[in-house]
Image (cartoon, grey):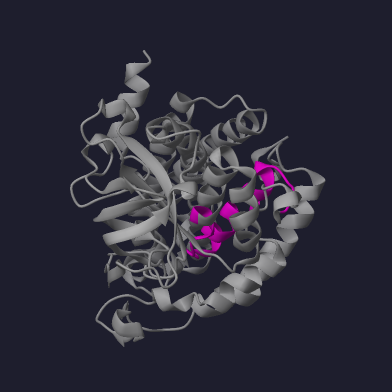
Amino acid sequence: MTTANYESPWKTEDARIFERTVRSFVATELAPKLAEPSGQASLDAGTSTPATGGTRTAATWTATTWMKAGQAGLLLPDVPDQYGGGGGTFAHEAVVVEELARAGAHIGFGIQSIVAHYILSYGTEAQKQRWLPRMASGELIGAIGMTEPDAGSDLHAIRTTGRKDGEHYVINGAKTFITNGANANLVCLVVKTAPDGPPARALSVVMLETEGLAGYRVGRPLHKIGRHDQDTCELFFDGVRTPVGFLLGSGEGRALFQIMDQLRYERLSIGLSAVASAERAVELTTLHAKERKIFGKPLLDLQNTRFRLAECKTEAHIGRIFIDNCIEQHIAGRLDAVTAAMAKYWLTDCECRIIDQCVQLHGGYGYMQEFPIARMWVDSRVQRIYAGSNEVMKEIVGSAL
């Protein structure tokens, strides 16, 4: 088999059928909104005020979009059907990740799946029945409240507290860089339940149903350099009360274990999106190089162009083989944390290298926001930061040597 007709071994016939559904949804429901010109919006007080820079806004993705995605089966495709999910494997989730990455659509379906897997892995049967079906339908939009102004990869630095008061936890603190934050009505929140206890047992994961929740406030939208269509904001908690029964897990102090376990899923998804973006960048740039003329000949006729694209194509294919192996290992239940860290750091570094080369080969057009390659360039940069910075990923790999 050559690289030209390579097929991912995890992509079963059922996954390929699902791929057609996802691709059709992306083309009809998401792509037209991505093409709409507008400035990066301010969502304060429910308004959209264009600002300089940006071509898409977080307001692009409405509740209707989420409900339609649920009806089409794009939400929670790897959650058992008894909880309203698609009943598939990670192969089905991977199809959604790939198609969104190829389209440059940064709607938070991936965060939805991550929140769902916290509930699926650690929730009681009552909790699963309460939240998962409504997440699968798009009625509930999930967010993860983990990062704080002074606590990113260092989870021990989390300050948001959850003090038990009778049948409730009283929560005080703040979170930042929260994807889906403005639209979320279900937040998977990491809080410090034992401020004076040992660090490894200090944190717990509790769920918040945010609609009409006293003391809960959504802060300003955060104006990022890329991913303007991705809803990212701050969250504030001032005496917020959530039932003790909304604690995830068999008891308090389990958050670090839960987070480390679930980060494999998140980092695998990020690695896959990096590969899909890199592959798409090579496709777009090859097409541009065939059509663009320089000195009376196609740009692709220049040896430098061919060599650069050959390097990009090769790196993208190496990344594809690696991520496919990781996906197979995950489906088989054998993906370890170190390999997931390798995939996250190396593939996102590779993504940024390839897309930067592709921007260069587009010339001045590569710097224009209406060209997909320019948007891919700014959108890709954060991949090396979130879900644990790549420097932290190398520490994880290094610690296993």
Chain part drawn in magenta: 86-111
The image quarter containing residue 321 is: top right
The relative height of residue 191 versus residue 333 in the rendered view (above or below) is: below
The relative height of residue 155 versus residue 82 in the rendered view (above or below) is: above
Write the residue at 36% across / 73% down.
Answer: 369
The answer to whether 103 appears left or right of 45 in the picture is: right
Write the residue at 58% across / 70% down.
Answer: 66
Residue found farthest to the left: 150
Write the residue at 25% across / 28% down.
Answer: 197
Measured as percent of width and height from the top left, residue 47 is found at 34, 86
Measured as percent of width and height from the top left, residue 344 is found at 43, 38
Q: Tell me the chief SS of the magenta region.
A: helix
Reply yes or no: does residue 123 show up in magenta: no
Residue found farthest to the right: 13
The image quarter containing residue 102 is: bottom right
The quadrant of the rendering that contains the C terminus is: top left
